[in-house]
Structures are given as C-alpha cells and as structure tokens.
Image: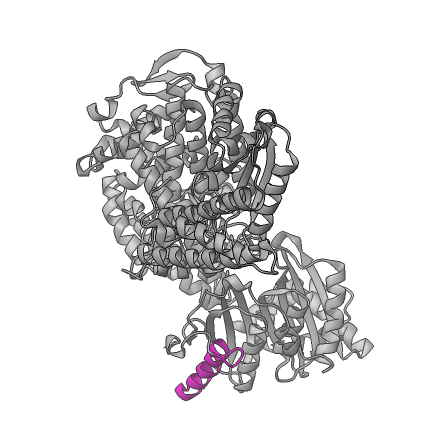
Amino acid sequence: MQHVTHPERIVDPVALDTMLDIAIERRGKASTQLALVGELKAVLQQGRTEIEARFVASQDGAAAMAGNSWLIDTIVRALHRVTTVTLFPVSNPTKGEKLAIVAVGGYGRAELAPQSDIDLLFLLPYKATPHTEQVVEFLLYVLWDLGVKVGHATRSVDESLRQATGDITIRTALLESRLVSGDEALFADLQKRFDQEVIEGSGIGFVDAKLAERDQRHQRLGDSRYVLEPNIKEGKGGLRDLHGLFWIAKYLFRVRSLDELVERGILSKDEANRFHRAEIFLWTVRCHLHYLTGRPEERLTFDVQTQIGERMGYTDHAGTRGVERFMKHYFLIAKDVGDLTRIFIAALEADQKRKPISLWRRLLPGTKSIEGFKIDGGRLSLVSDRAFEDDPVNLLRLFQVAESHRLDIHPHALRLVTQSLKLIDGKLRIDPEANRLFMEILTSRIDPETSLRRLNEAGVFGRFIPDFGRVVAQMQYDMYHVYTVDEHTIFALAQLHKIEAGELKEELPLASSIIDRIASRRALYLALLLHDIAKGRPGDHSELGAKIALKLGPRLGLDAEETETVSWLVLNHLVMSRTAFKRDIDDPKTIQDFVGLVQSPERLKLLLILTACDIRAVGPNVWNGWKAALLRELYHRSQEVMSGAVIADPRDVRIAKVQEQMRDLLPEFSPADFAAFTQRGYPFYWLSHDPATLARHGRMMREADRSAAPLTVANRVDQARAVTEITVYTADHPGLFSRIAGALSLAGAMIVDARIATMVNGMALDTFWVQDTNGGAFDRPDKLARLAVLFENVLGGKLDPRQELKRRPAFPSRTRVFTVAPRVLIDNKASTAHTVVEVNGRDRPALLFDLTRALTGQGVQISGAKITTYGEKVVDVFYVKDIFGLKIEHESKIREIREALVRVLVEPDGEPAVKPAAAKAKLSA
C-alpha cells in the first residue's frame, strides 16, 4: 500500500474514535445508527474533499487511490470498534464469535478510485453466530446510509477456500485480500491455507484461465488498444491487463511488489519502471474520469477527453490539438502494457511455469537452425542473446525471416528486441541491407500485415522510420477516423495485400483486375505506407508527406522514377476520392481536369488502388457500393480520354446519338410520342443521363400525362451500386429541391447524389440517389411506401419537413464536442456550364433542407448535388445557375450566397456553432 502523506488531514483515527463515542453518549432519543451516520457523513465528505484537492494539485492518481483507501479503512475500523466494544459487547467471546473484516479486489490492493465500490469479506472461523450477524448487519447498514457502495460476503475460512477452488473470480479476489480490522490470527490462517490448499500446484490452470479471461474481455470490448473511446479499466492495454500480470506474478512467485519481480529476475528494472509509469498514468486518468463525471465511469468518451487532457496539462502544440496529444499518450501507454504482457509471458516460459501458448510448441518440439536463427518450440528465436549487439541488422532480419518461413517469433526474442531498440540509430537506418529487408517485409506476398504489426508493437518500425514513429498512436479527433494513423496505415497495406492475393475480387473487381498490370508495385506499397505520414503536423499533410517520400525513397532503394511516383501519389492521394464524391463526373470538364492532373494510365491505376485501400481502412461501413461505383466510373471515363477513345463531337451531334440509342429502348413509343418526349428536354438534360435512364424517364412522363397525376414518383433499387434511384416528376416551383430533400430525410434516406432538370413544359424531373443509414440501398418496402406518403404530404403542403426534422435527435451528447469550421467554396472553373458551390460544416438534422432553402432564397437554380458525410462533417456540393440559366459571376451575388450559407452553418438554432470568423469563401473566376 502506498504511503499516504499526512493521513490525519484526511481523517484522524483518534479524533474519529472520540467523535463517535461522544455521538453515542449524546444521541438522546435518536437511534444510534442515525447518530453515527450524521457524524460520519461529515467526516467522509471532508476526507474526500481533501483527497480531491490534493489530487488536483499533484495529479497523482496513486496518492488519490491510497488516500481513498485510508479514508474507508479508518471509517470501517472505527465502526467495527464502536460496534463490538460499545454497542454489542461480548464479555467473554468464544472462538466462534471472532471476526476479521477483509478488503478484497481493488480495495484489497488499496487502489480505491473516487467512485468505486468497496468489496468486503466478513471472515469467520465457523458458521455465523447471532452476535457476528448482528455486528455485520449494523456495519453494513451504516455504510449504506453513508452512501458507500459495498459489495460483501460473509464466509468461514473453510467456505472461502472451497469457493476459491471452484471459482476463479473468488480466487483472484482472495489473492489480493488485506486485513482492515479484526482478528489477525483468523486472517493469517486464511492466507496460509489459501497458499497451501488453493494456490499450490494450480499455477498453470490459473494462468491459462486468466489469459483466456483477458482474451474474452478484449473480444467483448473491441480487440484493439486503439479504440477511440477506450475503456481504461477493461479495455485492451488498460488497468485490468496490468492487474492480470500482477495476479499471475503473485500466484506463481508469491511476490507482493514490483521490486520483488525485479529481484526474482522476472522483470528488468527498466521494465518494472515502465509498468509503474503505465499504472500511475492510468490511475490518474481514472481518477479524473470519476471526479469529472461523478460516477464510476470507465470509458474515455469524446466529451471528457478534451477536459481530462486540459486538466492533465496537454495543450495545443505544433499543429496538434491538446486532446490529440493526450490520447496519443494514452495509446502509447496501452502499447506499453501490450509490450509488458509479451515480456512477462516470455519470462513465464523461461521459468517453465506454464505450457507454451503456441500450438507450434506442441507440434514441432526441439531446436533447429534457420538463416542464422534457431527455431525453439516452433517459434523463431535467437542463437545468442548478443545477436543484436553483434549485428544490429538482425533487428530487421528477425522479422523478415519469420515472415518468409511463416513462423511466430519467440517472446524471449521480442523481449530482447525491445531492450535493443537503442541500436537502431542513424548508421543502421542508412544500411543498404537493413533497408532491403524492410522493403522485403513491406512488399511481401506472404503476410505483410502481421509482420508490420509485429514491427510496430516491438517499437522497431517507429525507430527505423522515425517519421512513422511520429504517427504511432496519433489519434484523429473526429467521428470519421476509427483508428490511429499507424493502425489505419497498416490496415490499408493489408487491403493492398488482399487485392494482390485475389481475396477481394467480388468487393473490388476493378482494382483486382488491374493490380497485376501495374509497373510500379514497390512504389504503390511505399506510397500507401507514407500517404498519412505527416498527419498531426502543421501544414498540408499531403504536401509534407510528398517531401518525406522524396527523401525516404532513395534510402529504401527506390530509383528516381519510383521515388517521384511515390511522392506524386502521396501528394495526390485524396484527389480521386474528392473528384468522384464531390464533383459531377458526367461533366466533361470534371474528367478533363482530372486527366490533366493524372496524365498517365499507370498513375490512374495506382491512384485507384491506393484510394480504395485508403477508404476501406478508415473504419467499418465507410466503404460501400456507391463509392466503389463512382470511383470505377471516374476511372473508366478517364481511361477513355487518355486512350483517345472519346472524341468531343459537337453538342447537337452528341444529343442526336443519345436520342438514337434511346429510341431503340422505347419500341412501344409511337413516332408522335417519341417526338413529344424529345421536345420536352433542354439540351443539357439529354447529356446528363445515360440512354437507359432517359428511356425510364420517357415512360414515366407519358404515364403521368395519361393519368393527369400532379405527382409521380418512381424508384429503382441498384444493388450493385448499393443505392436506390428516386425520380420525382411534378410541377416545378421554388423550393422544390428543399422539400424533396426534407421528405427523403424524414423517411431515413441519405442523399448521396442528385440531378435536377426542369422540362420545357414547366415540370420538374428530379432524380435522387439515396442510401440507408448503413450505406446500403434504401430498399425496404415499408420505407419506400412511407416515402411515397411523405412526398404527397410534404409537396402538398400538409407537412413542414423542417419542423419535423428539428424534432429528430442530433448526434449523441458525448459527440457534441466535435466542431467543424464552416467553409463555403464558390468555384467557377470546375464546370463549363455551372457554378460549383461546396459547403463544409457540422452535420445536423435538417441541414440539407436549410442549405437548399437558403440557395432558393437567393434566386439560385440547383441543377445537381453531391452529398458526402465524414463522421460529424458534411460536404455538400451544389451545381447551380442564376435565374437566367447562367453561371453566377457577379461578386456581390457570390458574397450574398456565401453569407446566407454561412448563416445556416453557424446558426442552426439561433446560436453560433463555431465563430463565424472561422468561415471563409473562395472564388475561382
């Protein structure tokens, strides 16, 4: 138990005893229990206030936990004394009336967090007597009246041992038992018999059970230490993992401190210091979490991360927010816990206290040599503990040989890797053989993900590539990026390997078909490794990463052409997704600009594969069929232009070709019907859709004319693109787009694309491509039926979509800490015929409705829209014209549009979401 400084300032045991005696004497007509509770509440509150004040000043979680334990210990002892001596005295107690009050669990370790329960064992020599039952009952009632959360059990020594033998949880609790008050001999008997009758001979079973319990816990909470809202107690790399290691140490080696583990040679002094630092950090974070929330909260949710980071002194620095620096420290600590777990298991195996974890050990017993290493029990290990000192290149070679022979690495070898990281210096980083081995690992056709993960976990990756070391555990504080930068990068490389291995042919048919035709395989792997290498630095991470690539490429053995390709890919790794998701790829100008940047078919192939890997590695459900379809379409159209297959015919010729193809798809149309249809569309309409879509429109309009329906709605589910096409044909009027968007939102449909057309007869033909909230086609029959009703009510004026949408809940309260600076970009160069308005802001219910209504209020015609959501951030792009069907080029009008859209972004409910000064507009004229 950690020493508590000036414990009497928290609670003075002598003064407390006197206070309770006086309270009993003066209780008058009040019950004894109420009298004691009245005094103890003040003592408890005063003690907790003192502990919290100390914690705020010192930021020492260990001291706070020890202080809380001391406070409860003192109250329990005082209560026990007054109960047995004053209230229920026994002049000549029998042996059966002896009682020991024992702390177990975290309280037994004297690690009591501010809001944690206390766990007490009321230990008896035999079955409970009426007197001990009376004492225990009174103690518990007082503690409960004080508001203390108590977990308790009353058992004899025999019963405690019997239950510990059959229940691993009870056995673990007793392992950390501590006498708080009562009979010392009784508690000593329990400890002695626990060692002899429970622990002795059961070490292997206990270790196996604890490791299995740990694995199940990790699986339940997300088997990654890089979860963005980690559970600091139960999550991977959290306090429970540290507890598990110490439980095993206590069980196997009968130690009670880290110093004893060092003396036994189980941990080195440096490893023990890492263990202690991790424990102190996690204790401190946990105390902050409890004090901040006022409850036993163990999850570092988004809403508390910023506040705890500030309280612990993490400030914004060098382009990185304070909360990101705090969470990076947390993830590095979690990584340390993983390292310590691996080191500890190696020590256990060396000590021959348990069977080896790997199945290889049982299948391949014995030792043999391979490429300068040895195979020990089926795992690659070192011939000598000096292998790294004799040749530091072995720090890379170990991982490359393990991968090439599909072997696990022995924990002892990994422990020596961790202890030898200082050997990775400037000299090793420029060693040709070391760099060759690294590229072999990176571009391996066997399993690069596992090897890179091993390199990262062992600390070799970040030491050998220092720029990568800067993004290890680097959090991106938003709702879009699920993983830290290093984890995202390794996941992306895993996607690339799977494409190359033919494992993603169904999900990524295009990438899978072209992967074998690329000439720059090494450049692609390195570009994917480096695409986010400069995240967290001030400046554009793509530009900074491209510069890093120019320096790193030659070091890793790439020639000048490969290095230039890597740098170009890193610089432009977001261009293809931005073009596909935020621009109209049916606009020839979009394809022209994109091809002008990419220039070569090889770069086009590389960029497509890199983009797919990058998006798929962001997190679950980010990639979907619609995004895949947009990227494929952009690829094919760009390829056609590059190959010269597309010849720019005059507009009237292109329209004639489209209508000719469309005529073949409408055999049931009479010449008069077909002529009437072709006369309805303006030139732009015929070039905005493919012939099959135009044919569907023709049938829809003819049916509407025949039925004289004021509103016609058609839907078509496209499972291949994971999208549903909704087409609305009705009389055009200002604000129609907004109302349709509102109806779609009310139905739970997410708009990803839209194409707006006004026909010559004054009717609107608006097409929307929508998905459900999971990124799939909006195809449930009940939802489609409801959508039809909503369209009638909204477009008929019976339902106000804005009022209905405002009632919808926004993001969960814990995510409201995320802010997005509003930004409006107005571009007259991106399209030949339209002004392109790009709006960036914080997503919320009714946002699209409000934005389109604002555009309508400015007299703007919306011809198309591309809607993309990145977590809490939304990017809405509108292709617009003025009331005369021309681009919007007058500066004063552009300013008015910008101001109207910014107002929607910053004042959704009358209160600014972000300071308006953060908003800006860009004009490309």
User: Does the segment drawn in magenta span residue 575?
Assistant: no
Residue at image point 73% right, 62% down: 783
Q: Residue furthest bottom?
A: 892
Q: What is the chief secondary structure element of the magenta stretch?
A: helix
* Residue 272 visible at all: yes
Instruction: Report whether residue 701 is seen.
Output: no
Nearer the observer, 82 or 788: 82
- Which residue range is magenta in the image? 890-911
Residue shown at the point (47%, 55%) measured from the top left: 44
Task: Give the quadrant of the C terminus.
Answer: bottom left
The image position of residue 577, as x and y in percent, is 46, 58
Indicate the position of residue 51 as horizontal and vertical percent values: 39, 55
Residue at the (25%, 49%) spot, across then down: 550
The residue most toward the right is 707
Q: Describe residue 435's horizontal placement relative to residue 922 as left or right.
A: left
Compare residues 5 and 449 and report the one nearer the observer.
Answer: 5
